[in-house]
Amino acid sequence: MAGWLSTHVLDTAKGCPADGIKIELYKVTGNSHKKIAESVTNADGRTDSPILPEGQFKTGTYELIFFAGDYLRATGQVDEDILFLDQVPIRFGMNEDSHYHVPLLLSPYGCSTYRGS
């Protein structure tokens, strides 16, 4: 079985999927970051396809950056110039050819993640 990476975002303050969040995926090697994918969440809070599909999957260290501030402003949850959460980075490792799912649970003043299924 080949590995692949998926993600989604849930807005825990509003109790719904977070539609329209830009997400970038980086491969991390030492102090180097190389952008390898970009996507936007759909009405279900998910990307339309895996952010790292089977054909491109390699084990290693990665970082997802969720552009949460744009979403929080667009949904009227914040209006400050400087936000508590703006770009939310999640760095994680994938050490086996398997499905990895890294969701973001988001509110204007808190977030969490886990390895989902």
Image (cartoon, rainbow, N blue to C red):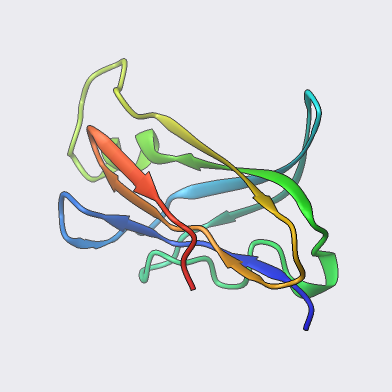
Q: Choose between 86 and 32: the one closer to the eye.
A: 32
State the residue at coordinates (52%, 66%): 47
Q: Is residue 107 above or below residue 10?
A: above
Q: Residue furthest front?
A: 95
Q: Choose between 95 and 20: the one closer to the eye.
A: 95
Residue 80: image location, x then y, percent: 23, 19
Q: Is residue 114 above or below residue 65?
A: below
Q: Choose between 99 and 64: the one closer to the eye.
A: 99
Residue 20: image location, x then y, percent: 41, 54
Q: Quadrant of residue 52?
A: bottom right
Seen in the image, is 101 located left or right of residue 94? Answer: left
Q: Choose between 103 and 14: the one closer to the eye.
A: 103
State the residue at coordinates (31%, 15%): 82
Residue 75: image location, x then y, percent: 23, 45
How many marks the image carries: the answer is: 0
- Give the quadrant of the N terminus: bottom right
State the residue at coordinates (43%, 50%): 21
Q: Residue furthest top?
A: 82
State the residue at coordinates (36%, 33%): 69
Residue 114: image location, x then y, percent: 43, 55
